Image (cartoon, rainbow, N blue to C red):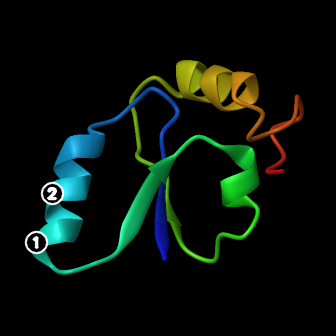
Amino acid sequence: MLYIIDYGMGNLGSVGNMLKKVGSKFLITSNPRELEKVTKLILLGVGAFDNAMKNLKELGLINSNGIWH
């Protein structure tokens, strides 16, 4: 299963539509528990890196040092 991390940034709908078109199974989530079992993920790029890091920390996906949980 492919996971797309929803951290409040990026165009999730566009990426989801592309994955549907090519027949990929995926889940959009911001739940840290679901992401513990991830082997493949998509973290959409953004131009506002500071805001992206802030959102990832607030969701508990990375710690204060920027290390993935």
Image x and y of residue 30, in percent: 58, 40
Q: Which amino acid does label 2 sit on?
A: Asn
Quarter-of-image position of residue 57: top right
The residue beneath circle 2 is 17
Image x and y of residue 37, in percent: 72, 70
Residue that sits furthest to the left in the current view? 21
Residue nearer the viewer, 67 or 27: 27
Q: Which amino acid does label 1 sit on?
A: Lys
**Up/down of 18 relative to 40, above or below:** above
**Up/down of 34 relative to 39, above or below:** above
Mark 1 packing: few (<14 Cα in 10 Å), some, or many (20+)? few
Image x and y of residue 7, in percent: 52, 33
Disc 1 vs disc 2: Cβ atoms closer than 8 Å? yes
**Up/down of 16 relative to 55, above or below:** below
Image x and y of residue 38, in percent: 65, 70
Please, what secondary structure does the residue beneath circle 2 have? helix
Work out how far the residue at label 1 is from the one at label 2, CA to CA, in angstroms: 6 Å
Please, what secondary structure does the residue beneath circle 1 have? helix
Which residue is depicted at the point 24% across and 55% down? 16
